[in-house]
Amino acid sequence: MEYSGVGIAITGCGSSAPNSTVTNDQLSQVVETSDEWIASRTGIRQRHLSDSSGTLVDLAAKAAKSAIEMAGIEPDQVDLILLATSTPDDLFGSACQVQAAIGASQAVAFDLTAACSGFVFGLVTAAQYIRTGVYRNVVLIGADVLSRWVDWNDRRTCVLFGDGAGAVVIQANERDRLLGFELRSDGTQNRCLNLAYASTAKPLLEDCEIGQGNFQPITMNGQEVYRFAVKRVPEVIEKALFRANLGVDAIDWLLLHQANQRILDSVADRLKIPSEKVISNLAKYGNTSAASIPLALDEAVREGFVKTGDTIAASGFGAGLTWGAAIFQWGR
């Protein structure tokens, strides 16, 4: 069935994180570091980590169920599930497993990979399906289990990442609450942050050699990523605001990918947005990649900070390199 083209609204949110937490002091028993060193450079105090039996699907499904409940719809009313992740349980994709886990029997489901920008890219993707009249109810999930791919001997990276999931329900709406967006990619800077595949040659036949191997732990040039973020993120937010025909003073909340508190502070300073308008839960969760924006949004909504009609400037940035911003209003 096709529906007439309409606007979108974000009507529900949910989140999930593993029960196990590791503080900076505990991490100092694993690698040479300290709470002061980590907190002063990143703002992170602890992170949630999945145990060996934990799955991405479990985290994603729990967040999705919570968002669906808040939106007041049933799972079999969901038309589309978008799972933004870089760490699926199955390299062929995990969205279909999430579909089964939440009982969304009528939904199409697929993974979307844009690393820490995944939620913003997914929001824009979901909007196109609704605006063109194809679907009415979309569940967008950002979820990552980065602990699987961290080198726990590398103190430059292992202190940064945590595991978690966040989800939203996006529905057809008479008034379009996605006011503007801007998305960007630059593959020439892929070397700055990646989780690369390493191949080993394996002779198969006399004249046929294939490559087999595995993905290597996360590598990152922290200084380059920092410089990239503090320059490009304010630019992309300003362009999204321009497309929305809004000024910075119209923003009620700045909701950035939770990568580093110094990045959050620098972007806010450049945009002249006061600190009380910046949503941050980085200290409790660390960098959860595609999960970080919806996880922080869910907490802010449930704690009563974000209210219906509030205007939010959200921006994701990270591996690829990818970055983007979306200006939206919470609620119908």
Image: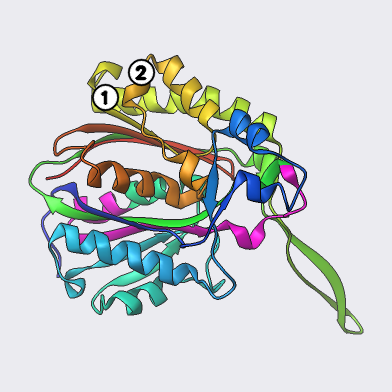
Between 324 and 216, the residue placed more toward the observer is 216
Residue at screen point 63% across, 38% down: 35
Q: Residues within 10 Å of mark 2 (few under 14, many from 20)?
A: some
Q: Is residue 198 magenta?
A: no
Classify residue 273 by image quadrant. top left
What is the three-letter code of the residue carrying label 1?
Answer: Ile
The x, y position of residue 163, in whole percent, is 51, 57
Q: Residues within 10 Å of mark 1 (few under 14, many from 20)?
A: some
CA separation in Å, label 2 and label 1? 8 Å
Secondary structure type for disc 2: loop
Give above or below for 37 relative to 135. above
Residue 49 in sight here: yes
Between 111 and 72, the residue placed more toward the observer is 72
Secondary structure type for disc 1: loop
First in sequence: mark 2 vs mark 1: 1
Q: Which mark is residue 97?
A: none
Residue, far left: 174
The x, y position of residue 198, in whole percent, is 78, 62
Q: Which residues are magenta?
A: 126-155
The x, y position of residue 121, in whole percent, is 40, 47
Q: Quadrant of the C terminus?
A: top left
Residue at which label 2 appears: 273
Report whether 271 appears left or right of 50: left
What is the three-letter code of the residue carrying label 2?
Answer: Ile
Between 183 and 42, the residue placed more toward the observer is 42
Q: Which mark is residue 251?
A: 1
Marks 2 and 1 in Cβ contact (< 8 Å): yes
Q: What colour scheme was applied to this rendering of the protein?
A: rainbow
Give above or below for 266 relative to 133. above
Between 150 and 220, the residue placed more toward the observer is 150
Residue 182 in sight here: no
